Amino acid sequence: MRKGTVQGVAGATVGAAAIASAALAIYLADEVRRHRLERSVRVWRLTARRGLHFAWVKARGVAADEARRAELDEHFAIRTAEDVAAELGNMKGAIMKAGQMISFIAEGLPEEAREALATLQADVEPMSPSLAEQVIREELGDEPERIFLDWDPIPVAAASIGQVHKCVLRDGREVAVKVQYPGVDRAIKSDLDNAEMLYGMFTAFALKGMDVKPIVDELRERMGEELDYRVEADCQTEFVERYRGHPFIRIPAVIGELSSQRVLTSEWVEGMTFSEFDRHGSYEAKQQAAEIIFRFAQCSIMRHGVFNGDPHPGNYRFHHDGSVTFLDFGLVKRWSKGELEALSPILDAIVSERPDATIAGMVEAGFVGRDHGLDAQEVWNYVSSPYRAYIPETFTFTPEYVAEALGRYLDLYGPHQDVIQQLNMPPSFVILDRVVWGVSALLGRLGGTNRWGDILREYLRGSAPSTLLGEIEADWERHSSEA
């Protein structure tokens, strides 16, 4: 190819990236103006409605509101703090959290094991409206109806330690208010203090040569952090700052003055859930979303050294402009000094198909002992299981691929049992392992086809962008560094 032709192709690529970036900037600017107008209308409408409601209550008496509250309470199973403690005590709270944290292995387990794991991950019943209001009063110092322009007593979601309400602030902004179940922090902390029980529970899932104690201690620390929403608020705010103005990655801002240890308030995000997107999203939209999810994980892990350790399908919202919003920063892992430096050479050696370099890096990082006596090729054959997708020029993730790879990884008595018996997982990498498999499962459900190895090397080695989204992100990073 002649020099002029090469320059023309390069110019066209950069030009396309610039046009796409400019178009996205115009769209977002229009979106900001539209949101301001929507907020003004929302304030007017809700203020009028509240005025009418106040007049109606005055005419009918406060008993009407009390009757409605009692009626709502009857629809929920958990009505008192004592009920919460009973519901989530006796190891159930910690086991549920543990079940969520190891849920990435579900597709590689037998049917009976998947059913048992599903019971650990089952959502609890939401607490009654009056109990949620009690938490708001205790944490924020006033009645929800005084704090918010509109408080919806019925939660839109309920999870293992808290539930989410959709509300409206007095300036018209819609927000998500996560309220922690009262007593759940004491119940789970009590469980986490029972270390011997947790060691025994995780031993059932561990590889034969794995030292469970430091791994459980790492998980105990991460699970303990999830109970304090102030920690989550700080982590989420850090991600907001790191990705502020990003062309296709969105993080909802935290409303700090309305957040506390047991209440977390952040911007409400409209968008398709994973299941809605899976049903209605086009092939092209799914391909873009898959790449965005992968890029968010790799950029956070490799460039920022802090990443979200919970790639759960419920933690994403998909938008018509092609962007993706990332939710829930309760489980965040931060690299300590030297950890990423020890990991990177191993990943590079695996995707470059260099068995000798792979085993050498694993020895240095503590995955196997120096006197292991293992064949380097056999080690590579096993540890490359979650990274085979990054070796060919292009690859399509499928649920079958993920299940097969997990099956190979978890086959304790199969052809790799000699490697498994000596393999240990340094505790600092256990959350990363969850992310690797969790993201792979998401890409499998989306049928992601891409040059995954080239994209990985952008973050692993600092290689040139390999896709249009990579060009757009690189352009954003250059402008961000210059600002």
Image: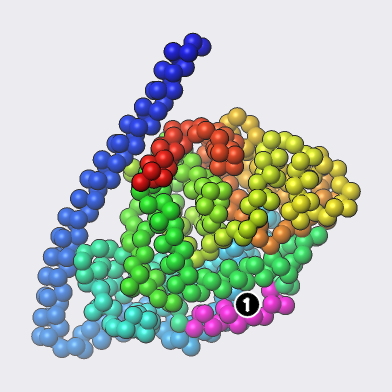
For residue 338, which quarter of the picture? bottom right
Return the x and y of residue 375 as percentages of the image width and height.
86, 43
Q: Is residue 448 left or right of residue 365?
A: left
Q: Is residue 162 left or right of residue 120?
A: left
Return the x and y of residue 347 as percentages of the image width and height.
67, 44
Residue 130, visible in the rendered structure: no
In the image, residue 41 lies in the stretch drawn in magenta: no
**Residue, x 50% and y 44% (percent of image)?**
295
Which residue does the numbered mark 1 point to in the structure image? 192
Front-lying residue, 78 or 251? 251
State whether residue 325 is above or below residue 1. Answer: below
**Residue, x 60% and y 82% (percent of image)?**
190
Q: Is residue 168 left or right of residue 218?
A: left
Q: Is residue 435 left or right of residue 45?
A: right
**Residue, x 69% and y 35% (percent of image)?**
352
Residue 264, visible in the rendered structure: yes
State whether residue 460 is above or below residue 244. Answer: above
Q: Main secondary structure of the magenta part?
A: helix
In the image, residue 194 lies in the stretch drawn in magenta: yes
Return the x and y of residue 141 as percentages of the image width and height.
32, 84
Q: Which residues are magenta?
A: 183-198
**Residue, x 55% and y 54% (percent of image)?**
305
Amino acid identity at mark 1: Leu
For residue 15, which quarter of the picture? top left
